[in-house]
Image (tube, rainbow, N blue to C red):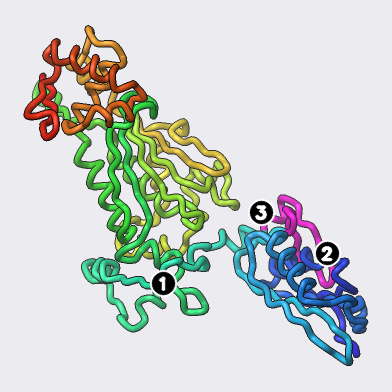
Amino acid sequence: MNLGIESEKLEFKKSTSELNEGVISLSAMLNKHGEGTVYFGVKNNGDIIGQKDLNEGTLRDVSRKIAEGIKPQIISNIALELIEDKKIIKVYAKGNNVPYSAFGKYYSRSFDEDKQLSPEMLKALINREGEPDYIINKLSVNQDLTFKVLKGLYIANDVKINNEKFEENLGLKTSDNKYNFMAELLADNNDISIKVVTFAGKDKSVMLKRTEYGGKCLLVSVNNVLEYMESINETKVKVGGIKRIEEKYFDFSSFKEAWLNACIHTKWSEEIPPVVYIYDDRIEIVSNGGLPSALTREDFFAGVSKPINKKLIKIFGDLDYIDQTGHGIPLIVKKYGKKAFYISEHTIIVTIPLNKELLENVENKNAYNDLNESEVKVLSILKNDSNCKISDLARMTDYSESYINKILRYLKEKNYIKRIGANKNGYWSVCG
């Protein structure tokens, strides 16, 4: 029996000794047409010769090789078929997460041949398809999800919704009607952690405070962070002549753009949420994933968008969280220059400097000339958390408890701190 001729969606291999070549053909067909079939036990001309020594272990080997070789991973249908007493293996795969690589290289199909893609051809392929929207294809571990908050946000913004098709219309389910990872992000409850972390000083050696805003609908968590950052953005008033000038610790508009960009463009499929770090001299907004594959640095700074999470961005736009004009990055560049951005293959960090003049005034006001670095660290922690225990101070500073006790005695002698109440239930009062 003859199965016909090879094509851009069909490939024949004589046996699984050509398994690597078969995996390459499968990836090439996925890149070209989004689906493809490879037969093992069939000559190039379509004649069935059968696969010798075929057993369940052979099928497992085929499955393992496909899982190891093709990235992002695919789920393939692998079947053993018997045609005219001859056993052959049929492998069919379908996927839309273009581009697919095979053993670290990229291929596309040209009639019955697999052509390795040059960097230019790969870029053209990605530009044509756009960045894969992984979070709508990735399954949520939790399938018991509700969306009361999300529906409420739509109603509050006067956006009409269809209750029966709400989840379908927003793309919260996969093709097999299961909740995807985007649904988990937007659900009323989830395990996604959004953090704002404050440090004492200009590095991460001493953490003062960590605030969690996750565990709920991403849109609410995102807004909670914005509200918190706006609340700590203190104002200084300058009076000169008839003018009254207000200055802030940082440019909130720049922070807002950086934070929203981090939340909608991070590679959520890797389940690493963006985070905000606050230091004495700057704020850092850190997002995971680097630039999208099809986006150059020049395009990025010009405000060109090649979104990773297209469906998520649409929802943010529907609810007026973003205006989708692409002005956010240029706004930050205009304010702080390109040096505000650190871009690597896996990370983007946006640095928002704090107002130097305000900082200098605060530093001068709180200049502890008679304290050493260790004493200043402990005092800074107590100013932020008056209930801090000696064991907590030791953990946060890496000092011994005996050294912490010595520091506390000195701070009390110098009237920097007072102990209010009993040792067990009292608290620290920072003077001045």
Residue 431, x across and y down, in percent: 11, 20
Gap between marks 2 and 1 measured at Cα: 38 Å
Query: Which of marks 1 and 2 precedes in the sequence?
Result: 2
Give the extent of the magenta segment. Answer: 102-124
Residue drawn at point x = 32 percent, y = 29 percent:
396
Question: Which of disc 3 and disc 1 is earlier in sequence?
Answer: 3
Q: Three-letter amino acid code at disc 3? A: Lys
The residue that appears at 40% across and 52% down in the rendered structure is: 263
Query: Circle 1 — which element?
Result: loop
Q: Which mark is residue 143?
A: 1
Picture quadrant of residue 121 = bottom right
Callout 2 environment at 10 Å: few (<14), some (14 to 19), or many (20+)? some
In this view, 269 is above or below 329: below
Q: Quick check: marks 3 and 2 in contact, CB under 8 Å?
A: no
Q: Nearer the viewer, mark 3 or mark 2?
A: 2
Quick one: quadrant of the C terminus? top left
What residue did someone put label 3 on?
Answer: 123
